[in-house]
Image (cartoon, rainbow, N blue to C red):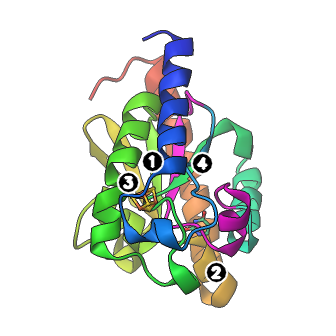
Amino acid sequence: MDSSEHESALREVEEEVRRCRRCRLARTRRRAVPGEGRPDADIMFVGEAPGGEEDAQGRPFVGAAGRLLTNLLRSIGVDREQVFITNIVKCRPPGNRDPLPEEIEACNEYLLTQIALIKPKIICALGRFAAQTLIAKNLSISREHGKPRRMSGILYIPIFHPAAALHQARYVDALEADFRALRGILDGELKRERTGGDD
Ligand code: URA
Ligand code: SF4
């Protein structure tokens, strides 16, 4: 696939998500939020589900948690425009309730297609739902945050959700530490690539 086919395949996913009615969240959303960023990003961030601001704008992480994510990225020298940002569930659950297992299941194919097209080196799973969906069903985010796992050639890193730090100050340090760890992992991956590591 050349880069224009690749970009149009990603745009097709986006359009499908915007029209999707596969689960009940279609009835209450204002706008679906497919995700945004570089089609060839090295790093993908996957959150839980759109909140109120995201639902109004149709864009991921544009509310308070999004501003914190943008600042944390900047603190490790990464521009938001360099990465791809999306969620495991593309439509807002009413009142920001937790997404239900059947909603995560109904929506998962979109995320898997985005991952297959973007082919990121690193996927950061933000919060428990993203980590349990992408990494392991019984993963404990409080025990395993910041610890990478390689699966099918991609490095997955569970990270606390930025929204947690907005509600509870004790998560701020952990989140900053996770981003510093991410910087180290990123440097390691880029170096590994230059020296031709292949495991
Ligand atoms: N929280 C999320 O998990 N995703 C968003 O897009 C915004 C807030
Ligand atoms: Fe479709 Fe996902 Fe939105 Fe449900 S949450 S309607 S599966 S895009």
Tell me where residue 117 appears, x and y as whole percent.
42, 29
Question: Residue at left 58%, top 55%?
Answer: 33
Question: Residue at left 63%, top 66%?
Answer: 30
Image: magenta residue range = 39-61
Q: Nearer the viewer, mark 3 or mark 1?
A: 1
Q: Is residue 108 above or below residue 198?
A: below
Indicate the secondary structure of the residue bearing disc 1: strand
Disc sitting over residue 123 in the figure: 1
Indicate the secondary structure of the residue bearing disc 2: helix
Q: Is residue 118 above or below residue 103?
A: above
Task: Provide the residue designation for mark 2.
Answer: 165
Callout 2–callout 1 Cβ contact below 8 Å: no
User: Which is nearer the N-term, disc 2 or disc 3?
Assistant: 3
> Quadrant of residue 21 in the image?
bottom left
Callout 4–callout 1 Cβ contact below 8 Å: no
**Residue 163 inside the magenta-drawn segment:** no
